Amino acid sequence: MALIVQKYGGSSVGDAGKIKNVARRVAQTKDKGNQVVVVVSAMGDTTDELIKLAYQINERPDERELDMLLSTGEIISCTLLAMALEAMGYEAISLSGAQAGIKTDAVYSRARIQSIDPERITRELEKGNIVIVAGFQGITDDMDVTTLGRGGSDTTAVALAVSLGAEVCQIYTDVEGVFTADPRIVPEAQKLPEIGYEEMLELATYGAKVMHPRAVELGELFNVPILVASSFNDSPGTLIHGGVAMEVRNKVRGIAHDLDVAKITVVGVPDRPGIAASIFEPLAKANISIDTIVQNASVNKITDLTFTVAKSQLKKAMEVVKPIAESIGARECVSDSTLGKVSIIGTGMQNTPGYAARMFGALREKGINIELITTSEIRITCIIEEDRVKDAVRVLHRAFELEG
Ligand code: ADP
Ligand code: ASP
Ligand code: MG
């Protein structure tokens, strides 16, 4: 008997009919003689709606209360799925993250899983139950409910697969797998039959929303294969795993994009030791994640310092940085919240010249201005105007001949 962990995303459980569809798929897996643990996301846009509601009530909702509120979205879908299975004659039980033994740290809205005590799940499986776990949530040592960050149900699923020793973690969503680019933007994008953890992690981190980056990280760390496939048909999907052949693959595997980029520039900063620390330490203390950082070469001991944050963190970041900029004698502090980023990713780019030139050439062809550039061994990212991101994804997909 195999133990299988499946996860169904928000659009797969968007209404009663879709929940019944998921119930049928879960039942089929159970009928094949497997033990089944299912993780679900909140129905459709529930999480967005709950956030909107909270902000209508309070411009600065308390973060503990917000997490408690958001966790209810997944509670709704997991109870309904259990009811759908019961209506079909199957024994099923829904569990909240806390009931499923998922312990996290206390960083609200992006808590990290610290441990899972699988005792309750195991007990329910032994009784013959299908176990449905509310995704995206856990509980602190003080018994406060936390959420894992947007898209975090993927991470719940992989973490459960690790802790229960499942053979595979199946992520069912509204596309047929991982594509060479977001298929909603590039209709010619190709489904990848398989992809390595490392490339998938870069794709996810740089915006390919089909997988939560931390889920990929966990899969890699514990070597759990992750299958990404459609919840609406039986097409084979994409297997994310560690054994992808090295030399036979395309050198650029995929294009990722992200529309959630804001930039802050501290202009006219005196160039002396300790300045960067004096800006970034308070930002870290305020729990603001910084992405790209660029410091210009200084002229006459004066330089500019630019960095990017998520748009939702811009206001808070400016509140932190402005007084510091003043106190260190910087000229001014400006921001731009109309940016996005586009990345080419592939392990085959390592030690191979010419990729950056080809990328910049393709963007030039479309008249797209590059504001900032960052690279890793297997990735080149350009920060550009938000309005041009979709054009950029399409032109790069063509330039790197990803349409197959
Ligand atoms: P779920 O609700 O099932 O978690 P998400 O909306 O989080 O689904 O992720 C699926 C979406 O990810 C797709 O609808 C697609 O638009 C987007 N996406 C972005 N990049 C890619 C990619 N490279 N391959 C597949 N889907 C992608
Ligand atoms: N419901 C949460 C979100 O919308 C978690 C998830 O879908 O994975 O981000
Ligand atoms: Mg998702």
Image: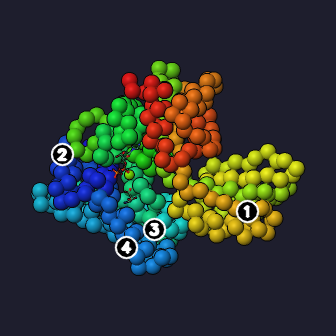
| Residue at 85 percent of width and 55 percent of height | 272
Residue receiving disc 3: 146
For the residues labelled 1 and 3, say whether their Cβ atoms are less than 8 Å apart: no
Question: Which amino acid does the dot numbered 1 rest on?
Answer: Glu
Residue 289 as seen in the image, left or right of residue 296: left
Q: What is the x, y in percent for residue 327?
A: 79, 69
> Upstream in the sequence, badge 3 or badge 2?
2
Residue receiving disc 1: 332
> Upstream in the sequence, badge 1 or badge 4?
4
Q: What is the x, y in percent for residue 401?
A: 45, 24
Residue receiving disc 4: 53
Question: Which amino acid does the dot numbered 4 rest on?
Answer: Leu
| Mark whose residue sits in front, 1 or 4 | 1
What separation in Å lies between label 2 and label 4 (alpha carbons)?
A: 37 Å
Q: Nearer the viewer, residue 106 or 99?
A: 106
What separation in Å lies between label 1 and label 4 (alpha carbons)?
A: 36 Å
Q: What is the x, y in percent for residue 15?
A: 21, 59
Question: Which amino acid does the dot numbered 3 rest on?
Answer: Thr
Residue 209 as seen in the image, left or right of residue 43: right
Question: Which amino acid does the dot numbered 2 rest on?
Answer: Gln
Label 4 crowd bin: few (<14), some (14–19), many (20+), radius 10 Å: few
Label 1 crowd bin: few (<14), some (14–19), many (20+), radius 10 Å: some
